[in-house]
Image: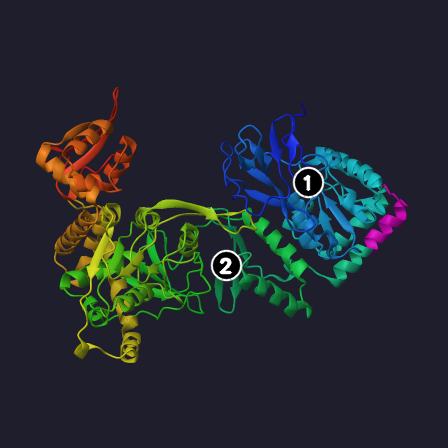
Amino acid sequence: MRNDPFAPVEHNANSAVTTPASGWTAVAPVPDNAEPPPVRHSRLGTPSQRWCYRNASGKLLFIACRFDTNEGKQFLPLSYGRDEQTSANGWRWKGLPEPRPLYRLDRLEADPDVAVIITEGEKAADAAAAMLPGFFVTTSPNGSKSARKADWSPLSGRRVIIWPDADEPGAAYAEAVVQCLTQAGAASVSVIRLSQGLPAGFDAADAFAEGWTDVQLQALIPASGEAGVSAAVSDADDGEAEGAAELKKQRKKKPSAFDFLPGEIEFWHDPDRESHVTYPTGDHFEHWPVRHRFFKSYVAGVYYEKTGEALGSSALDDTIRIMEAKAQSGACYPTFRRVGSHDGDYFLDLCDQDWRAVRVTKGRWTVGQFPHVKFLRSASARALPEPQRGAGYRDLKPFINVGSEQDLMLVTAWLVAALRPEGPYPLLCVSGEQGSGKSSVTDLLANLIDAEIGKKRTVSKDERDLVIAAKNGHVLAFDNMSSVANWFSDSLCRLSTGGGFATRALHTDNEQIVLEAQRPVILNGIPDLTGRADLSDRAIAIHLPRIPEEERQTERHLKEELERMRPYLLGALLDAVSEGLSRRASVKLANPPRMADFAEWIEACSPAFGWEPGQFLEAYRLSRTDAAKVALENDPFGSELIRIIKRHRATGFSGTATHLLEVLNEHAAPAIKNMRVWPSTAATLGTLVRRAAPLLRSEGYAVTDSRTAEGRMIIIRPLSSAHPNEETGV
């Protein structure tokens, strides 16, 4: 059997082709409804670069991946297919068979008259395409030893120039490609020979990195002719002369956009390997993904300003691809949305045209430009006012219809927590009848620190929408909810205390959106929204009273007054954040609640609002107690479990899930046992007990588990006999 990572399949076929040796059937092109490809290899980790091979119609065929490991660089192909034994569809770290497709076939027919340049490898091809926009640039997959395994027929009748690496393998690759092109019917073929003074292995990517000039590039073909290194299907000398003339003509006609970019521009990537750029414009720097339309417009504008010509879409796209590759070899920086951190200081992006931010340090805050903090912005983000000093948290009261001082404290605490670049963040759940101002409160609070067009949204239809919203903003706000679905509750809990999400980006891309983050969330509705125990355990619940008719104000008046006060309200919150940075190292809670980091942070910030030590903690404790009662009322299983434990097992329970189910079935009320929520199996019981653990804890019982020879044991015991801060281990 051939020792080759590429498993056979016709790359230009629309149907599956079986690989007898492996029992695996590859499919090319990849179906539009295929699941996203894996983002990591089980052994090699995350690829440092990925190149998508597509057919002439732009359909994905397979992905070539590069891994930078401690042992050096490694390359693996990734393709889609079906396991013949299990009939399961999926991705494998295998590639397409002989003959394999050439790189960038989807661009080949854009101009059938241009000359073709062949490099050794995808990275070199991307670099050559950026430097030589008047040519079609391609390569064959799987390295220099696999040239004869590629399908060169698309280059029949074309003029071809080969740019190999400057070493012996490169020379061997060029010789093999010449023979393949001769058989494929290329019109002419010439080979570039680089000068003797270059390092071994020097290629187009190195020339790009060194910033080769037009003169250096134009000298390539003449140097090849002088060295006498050529092979031609037609006359070699004529082919080389024609290629040199073409190169000079194209370079004179279409200079590269790279020639005109400012020296201060920086290409970099984030920890998820997404490519970004920082570039100067006006009197400030901006940060955008390399493929963002704003940066594309910037590149096209610079090109037009310097040349007086429009940069073609194909040339722009090729340039952007090289910039993405360049970013992958650049520095790695964390990215932020609206709030960020650097060297212990916090930053708030004002999202104004001057790209200013607020830097918050211990005891003070200042407004300025801080380009070293990599803030990203969505198109819907809007500017915050420049904050001003002179207000207190009670100046928020006229704009939100809270019913007590306790609720005002809790709302203020949620805002101060949301100004931190890291969580956990409590969920702010606002309830109240019609006319209580729920939507207005939600809109005000969310936009006070993260202004955005259409900030309030309806419930996401699925997790993909939620992930996209979380990836593109800081505060998430959901309006007029009638209930919280189980999947949505689970997702909100992960956003609150941290968790990972992965979902499809676009069906046509076969890419994933991967997000591991925490976000502040506010949601409102007429009913109480903390019905599930795990949600209530992470929530601040606020109930708004109905606004009497005689106290209602016009929306216009409220907006005018709010706009006047917005800078001062923001300043008051920033005063609290600076206070918290000064005191957080010295604040330690004796008996921290769930969301302990949040509680400790607010306690550190409390003196800025004039709150006494422990005053906020007591308000937070009462809120959690109220939320737990609501959750208990909405959980018939949890309520019955607590009733049975208190009445029949007051000292607790220790046993298997099967044993616990027997005890519950023996003592449960018939009406409860007949409900759909009642567990029928021990496995289901285990899940329900885990969900009910916060309710049990609120009623004085700790839930843990252990592994014994008998199996998994569920232990429910009074908190007085457990560790004071014990959390569920179930």
- Amino acid carrying label 1: it is His
Quarter residue 574 falls in: bottom left
Q: Nearer the viewer, mark 1 or mark 2?
A: 1
As rendered, which of 601 and 461 lies closer to the eye? 461
Residue 154: % across, % down: 77, 46
- Per the rendered image, the range of residues in magenta is 231-245
Q: Secondary structure at mark 1?
A: loop
As rendered, which of 56 and 48 lies closer to the eye? 56
Query: In the figure, is residue 487 to the left or right of 145?
Result: left
Residue 533: % across, % down: 23, 46
Residue 232 magenta: yes
Q: Which residue is tagged 1?
A: 11
Tell me if residue 434 comes above or below residue 603 in the rendering.
below
Which callout, 1 or 2, points at the residue further toward the start of the chain? 1
- Whether residue 206 is visible, yes or no, is no
Label 1, label 2: how far apart the Cα atoms are: 35 Å
- Amino acid carrying label 2: it is Trp
Residue at horizontal 21 percent and vertical 31 percent from the top:
661
Quarter residue 384 falls in: bottom left
Q: Secondary structure at mark 2?
A: strand
Residue 225 magenta: no
Q: Which residue is tagged 2?
A: 288
